[in-house]
Image: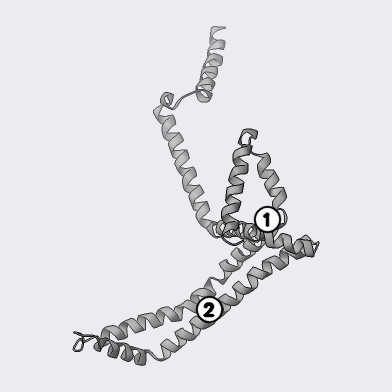
Amino acid sequence: MTETARPTLGDRRRTERRTNQNLAELTLPEFRRMLLTTTLFVIVLLLFLWMVRTVIIATILGVVVAVYLRPVYLRFLKAIPNRTTSATITLLIVIVPVIALLIYSYLEIADVATYVDAHRQGIAAKIDAALHRIPFMQKANTGESVERWVVIASNYGTSIPNTIRAALGSFAIAATIFIFTAFYFMIDAERIGAYLRSKIAPRYQELMTSLEENVRGVLYGAIY
């Protein structure tokens, strides 16, 4: 009977030690194992967040834009009693000008880069002549330095369009997530807000209401 009871008692003590123990009661191997597990978990979590940083940024931006455009969406909803149509029109008001601005900026950058690449010597000569008109620099030998920096600037400007083309893939993914998040957050803001409020303890409801009013005042006060 004694031999049979010993394993049961030992198992019970091990179970109690694992479930009800303080940090000071941990043995050195247990502490090392816990520290190693926690460190590996933090590293994996940080690497995962770094990998999906574009998705996270696009999601946050979509939520912020949806909150800003919520009053505009409600005005369209009064005139057009269709949530999908009203949200689409509201997003187009922002997306179309942004796309037009991006296209215009790309064309301007490409044009300037092409001009600088074709007129390197002329630009370097004009900069060198302007430098020689500065007092105490009339006799300075700046021709080679100016030409070298013009070449560097020209190469950098020429690489910008290629960099933009290479980033179109990730930009398309981020833009899709942004539009998806902004669209559904704008339409289902009431249900999302009700779900979040239901997860908060009743004793914090007053604090939540005050915080919500302050955040809404900060967000809308800058525009509306």
Q: Is residue 199 above or below residue 28?
A: below
| Residue shown at the point (62%, 33%) measured from the top left | 203
Residue 176 spot, x, y in % from top left: 64, 64
| Residue shown at the point (66%, 44%) measured from the top left | 196
| Residue closer to the observer: 211 or 162 | 211
Extreme right residue here? Answer: 81
The C terminus sits in image quarter: bottom right
Residue 50 spot, x, y in % from top left: 50, 55
| Residue closer to the observer: 158 or 183 | 183
- Local secondary structure at mark 1: helix
Residue 32 spot, x, y in % from top left: 41, 34
Circle 2 sits on which residue? 105
| Residue closer to the observer: 125 or 137 | 137
Q: Residues within 10 Å of mark 1 (few under 14, many from 20)?
A: many
Q: Is residue 122 above or below residue 210?
A: below
**Quadrant in which residue 69 is drawn:** bottom right
Residue 59 spot, x, y in % from top left: 60, 57
Horizontal arrangement in the rendering, residue 117 relative to residue 68 (left or right): left
**Quadrant in which residue 171 is drawn:** bottom right
Horizontal arrangement in the rendering, residue 216 relative to residue 155 (left or right): right
Q: Residues within 10 Å of mark 2 (few under 14, many from 20)?
A: few
Q: Which mark is residue 51?
A: none
**Quadrant in which residue 205 is drawn:** top right
Extreme top residue here? Answer: 1
Horizontal arrangement in the rendering, residue 122 relative to residue 14 (left or right): left
Q: Which mark is residue 185?
A: 1
Label count reads: 2
| Residue shown at the point (60%, 68%) measured from the top left | 172
Say which amino acid is labelled 2.
Answer: Ser
Say which amino acid is labelled 1.
Answer: Phe
**Distance Cα–Cα, label 2 vs label 1:** 30 Å
